[in-house]
Amino acid sequence: MAFKKGESGNPNGRPKGSKDKATAAIRQKIEIFLNQKIEEIEQIWQELEAKDKLTFLSKLLEYTVPKLRSQELNISEYSKFSTDDLRTIANEILNNIEDEQN
């Protein structure tokens, strides 16, 4: 029996963001391939021109680092901080970003 549009045998469906088996299998194959070819990739990297290295990195980062959302920052709020305070804040932010990536 066919279902009507918008209806299925499982009204709750698969949870948002859950990965299907095919995607997981493809990701695993890509990871295996890259691990096997890492030396070749490093050699190709060495031969790239600087602009091509930037293009490569920007495309790779799309798959490794979450995209950032635009946020508004009011600089006047930070004028009460000393330069050292601002450096400390910036370093804490950078350390948190590094921790999240690892």
Image: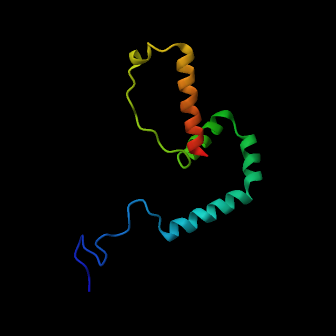
Which residue occupies the foreground of this view, 16 or 35? 16
Query: Looking at the image, which residue is at 54% across and 26% down?
Result: 90
Which residue occupies the foreground of this view, 50 or 22? 22
Whether 12 is drawn above or below 76: the answer is: below
| Image spot of residue 4 (x, y percent) | 22, 76
| Figure quadrant of residue 70 | top left
Which residue occupies the foreground of this view, 52 or 59? 59
Whether 98 is drawn above or below 63: the answer is: above
Extreme residue in the bottom direction? 1
Whether 79 is drawn above or below 64: the answer is: above
Extreme residue in the left direction? 4
| Figure quadrant of residue 87 | top right
Query: Looking at the image, which residue is at 30% across and 79% down?
Result: 9
Left/right of residue 81 with respect to residue 3 in the rendered view: right
Check the image and tell me how it is coloured.
rainbow
Query: Looking at the image, which residue is at 53% across and 25% down?
Result: 89
| Image spot of residue 80 (x, y percent) | 44, 13
Task: Give the quadrant of the N terminus.
Answer: bottom left
Q: How many marks?
A: 0
| Image spot of residue 22 (x, y percent) | 51, 70
| Image spot of residue 19 (x, y percent) | 47, 64
Left/right of residue 52 with respect to residue 8 in the rendered view: right
Which residue occupies the foreground of this view, 85 or 69? 85
